[in-house]
Amino acid sequence: MTDPWQAATVTAIVAETARAKSFRLRFGRPQRFEAGQHYVVRLTAPDGYTAQRSYSVASAPDGGEELELTVERLDDGEVSTYLHDVVEVGDELELRGPIGGWFVWDGMSPALLVGGGSGVVPLMSMLRLARQQGRSDLLHLVVSARSPADLYYSDELPGPECAVAYTREAAPDSERPPGRLVAADLPDDPAAVVETAYVCGSTGFCNHVTDLLIGGGMPAERIRVERFGPTG
């Protein structure tokens, strides 16, 4: 059963890119969520009008009263523009969650994570959980970003379990030329090294990566996909 609406206080706001911010939120009670789940944020105007949007949790489950949501700003979005342009540390927001039971990682089985753009957010929760438990060896994360300026969590991602593929402008020290993800960017014979593949991003991105994985021998039933569309 989904939890009812609850209040949370913004304790920190961090700019991830020019168009994405992470919001640290403190609730009045522990939050029991799994890596990969999301929460709904609801805004209520003085006249009673409400707008709500779903945002994935970026922080690792730790049983505490705080969690982190990362939000991309959409120019015509009702909720994302308010969060980016109006909300400040100390403000209170209304949330409901956690939600979702399919696109979750238990922190115990080997997994391949492939994220495009903002699709890296729920995968970051999984990566942070693995690092928190000292089990980074269980994960291999591949992130696709347009350019270094568009890469979320750039200070945290570097590591032996992570690889970044830039599609339009590569980093100065990158040996990979910019371009769309190809089979060579993914592990050889993924079905032999991981139990499940988690793919998150736009519909086109997810379809492309799924085709690459199946072409590499990964059974379709072992691929979990979460498609991100514009959510303002």
Image (cartoon, rainbow, N blue to C red):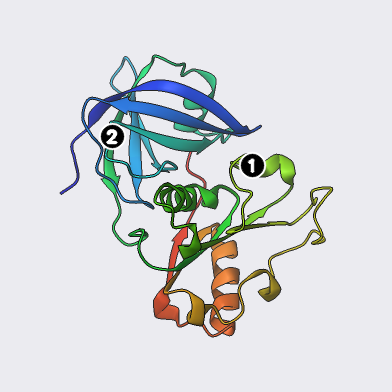
Q: Is residue 86 visible?
A: yes
x and y percentages locating residue 3 in the rendered image = 19, 40
Dot label at residue 94: none
Hey, which residue is sitting farthest front in the picture? 134
Residue position for label 1: 154
Measure how far apart labels 2 and 1 are at the Cα level: 25 Å
Which quadrant of the view contains residue 182? bottom right
The three-letter amino acid code for the residue at tag 1 is Ser
Other-residue count near label 2 (Cα within 10 Å), few / some / many at <14 / 14–19 / ≥20 = few
Label 1: state its secondary structure: loop
184 left or right, relative to 194: right
Q: Residue at x 32, y 14 (%)?
A: 46
86 left or right, relative to 97: right
Is 57 drawn above or below residue 6 in the view shown? below
The three-letter amino acid code for the residue at tag 2 is Gly
x and y percentages locating residue 56 in the rendered image = 41, 45
Q: Is residue 198 visible?
A: no
x and y percentages locating residue 224 in the rendered image = 42, 68
Earlier along the polypeptide chain: callout 2 or callout 1?
2
Residue position for label 2: 64
Which quadrant of the view contains residue 101? bottom left
Residue 211 vs residue 129, the one in the foreground:
129
Label 2: state its secondary structure: loop
Is 202 drawn above or below residue 86 in the view shown? below
Other-residue count near label 1 (Cα within 10 Å), few / some / many at <14 / 14–19 / ≥20 = few
Which quadrant of the view contains residue 154? top right
